[in-house]
Image (tube, grey):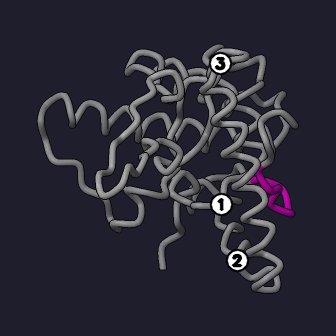
Amino acid sequence: MAEKYAPEATVKDRRVQEMAYTSADITIKTVTETVSVQPEIALKDGSKVTAIIDTDTKLTEPSKDKLEDIELESRSIKDNELKSDNERAAAAILESIAKKQKEIKEKIERREKVRFSRSADMFSSIVLYNKPEVGSKAEAKIELYSALKEKHNDYLAARFSGNLLSFSDKLLKKDAVSDKELSLPVEKARKYSDL
């Protein structure tokens, strides 16, 4: 069975999250979440459901140019022999996420169909979003979402005796031939305020 690529894993590693959000080597700061962070809030008024569209809480994806910059900066970290193995492996994963996201944007622009190997990847793959401005509603949203996600993962890990997160060891290798690996153990993603 082929190794699953880390950007498509539903459990992300803290080292990748931290590199995208706080690394001095990456100029375009991003949050690493799935598309499930984006749903609109709905309000039920009697039998009528009204969507509340609040653009202040929407997270925006980086443009193709910014994704290309992230990809290039990540590649330079990955190829830098002076960086630690963890930094190089996290950069390789971040590079792969940015490359895949850029390819999807290009397909959408050309009006081509975007296909996923599994339908679950459409909803659970890691997506890069621009880091929200400090004090904005979007920052409050991502902070709340990441805190709830952390609590949910803790609950599931305890409920299933830790077996839930065992598949996340697939994060260790970017691909079968890569010599860049995240060291054990896999580190659980945290709230952004804790990074």
Q: Closer to the camera, 136 or 154?
A: 136
Amino acid, disc 2: Leu
| Image spot of residue 185 (x, y percent) | 86, 63
| Image spot of residue 49 (x, y percent) | 32, 50
- The residue indicated by pointer 2 is 164
Sequence-first tag of 3 and 1: 1
- Identify the secondary structure beneath mark 1: loop
Q: Residue furthest front?
A: 46
Amino acid, disc 1: Val
Residue at the spot 46% in from the left edge and 43% down from the top edge: 41
Q: Closer to the camera, 177 or 72?
A: 72
Q: Closer to the camera, 3 or 97?
A: 97
Looking at the rendered structure, the number of numbered marks drawn on it comes to: 3
Relative placement, left or right, of 41 versus 31 is left
Which contiguous range is marked in magenta? 182-189
Residue 186 colored in magenta in the image: yes
